[in-house]
Image (cartoon, rainbow, N blue to C red):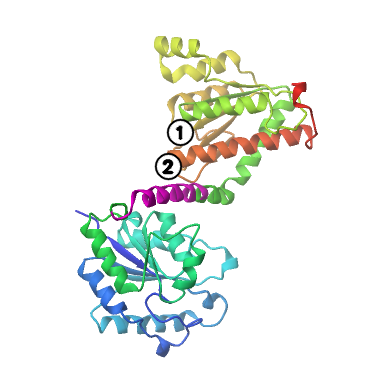
Amino acid sequence: MTQRRFVVLDRDGTINIERHYLSDPDRVELIPGVVQGMHQMSQMDLGLVVITNQSGIGRGYFDPMRLELIHQRLRELLKAEDVHLDGIYVCPHRPEEDCSCRKPRPGLLELAAKELDFDPKACFVIGDKACDIELGKRVGATTLLVRTGYGDQSSASCTLLPPDYVVDDLLAGANLIQQLLASGGTKEKMQPSVDRLRNRVRNHLFESGEVKRQMVESCVDSIIAAADLISETFRSGGKLLLCGNGGSAADCQHMAAEFVSRLTKNFDRPGLPAIALTTDTSFLTAFANDCGFEGIFERQIQALGRGGDVLIGISTSGNSANVVRAVKVAQAGEMHTIVLKGKEGDREGRADVTISVPSTDTQYIQEAHLAIEHILCALVERDLFGQEKEVNIHDY
């Protein structure tokens, strides 16, 4: 059964006339063309959901009961024209409360998608502000900026993250959506090739950046703990071993090179003992051929690792069998262990420090892992050797 598609609508300036901190139900007035537009969307069997920021509650300008009366009036006006809303979702918080539900954060849209069973990437997000467009971009939806409300002003502030389409009002938006659905339902089929490429680039950079933003909330403490563990290992005369597959193998070599050489150009320090277990092609091919691929890192740890050393295992899935076995044998040998992984996967769960990137997309996880690796190198350098010093590169 095909999942029903939804239109996610802003409220003030998109459906009803913008009134600063609207608090009186009697002042709810629909924008011309809204009823026709929403009725047309309903005829296309599109669900209709409203997501609105209402910080007036958090600021004490009106209470939730007053807001409910406003929404009751809005529903009445729409119902009189045979338009039904599937849901209204509200963020009552002030911006400084840093909640997860205030647009452009996707908390309310994700909640609506879960409760109403629709795919956020397949929905259309329509609003008159930059935060509405950013909300849609964060979930991969098709975005439409209406010129009603603050739309004309917002178009200037959307240059870094432009909407997929700009329309005069909700009725024009409904007409456009109808064209999109008739053309196969994807915005790419109606965009020139250059625009498609620009959107893909922008979306990738934005989504990758959003993963890193979420890491500020979820990964900082574990990154610091990992850096402390590596620093203490080096202080105690131990070494760093690294293992991973594919792109993660390249990360291992990159990180080992930074420690043995240096991360910061003008930083006068000795080399630090770091070995990537991904570089000896004679051993890797011999052991994998004779004994199996799952043991390629385990065997090297048995041969090269010593108690007090530290192992970094990198796995975007968190379930790479040879990395999991490496972590286990390292711990059995009284080595410290650090794991870099994505949001999912728990087979390596016994690591001393686990840094979980909040994403399930391999490319964004790998981009985040590279950032973590650079941060770890920088923290360890400064912890062990203090501040940067000018040095002549020809000395090395």
Task: Tell me residue 123's x, y (percent).
Answer: 32, 59
The residue at the point 55 percent across, 82 percent down is 61
Q: Residues within 10 Å of mark 1 (few under 14, many from 20)?
A: some
Q: Secondary structure at mark 1?
A: loop
**Residue designated by label 1:** 347
Q: Nearer the viewer, residue 130 or 241?
A: 130
Give yes or no for residue 288 being in the magenta stretch: no
Query: Relative to 173, is 105 above or below?
Result: above
Q: Which dot, 2 or 1, sits closer to the camera?
A: 2
Q: Are marks 2 and 1 in contact (CB under 8 Å)?
A: no
Is residue 226 among the parts visible in the rendering?
no
Task: Tell me residue 133's x, y (percent).
Answer: 43, 62
Q: Secondary structure at mark 2?
A: loop
Left or right of 77, for residue 202 = right
Give yes or no for residue 192 being in the magenta stretch: yes
Task: Tell me residue 33's x, y (percent).
Answer: 30, 79
The overriding secondary structure of the stretch rendered in magenta is: helix
Distance of mark 2 from mark 1, alpha carbons? Answer: 18 Å
Magenta range = 190-209
Q: Amino acid at mark 1?
A: Arg
Left or right of 80, for residue 51 = right
Task: Tell me residue 315's x, y (percent).
Answer: 48, 32
The residue at the point 21 percent across, 66 percent down is 44
Is residue 83 among the parts visible in the rendering?
yes
Q: Amino acid at mark 2?
A: Asp
**Residue designated by label 2:** 361
Query: Relative to 106, is 66 above or below?
Result: below
Left or right of 43, for residue 147 = right
Q: Quadrant of the C terminus?
A: top right
Left or right of 68, for residue 264 = right
Q: Residues within 10 Å of mark 2 (few under 14, many from 20)?
A: some
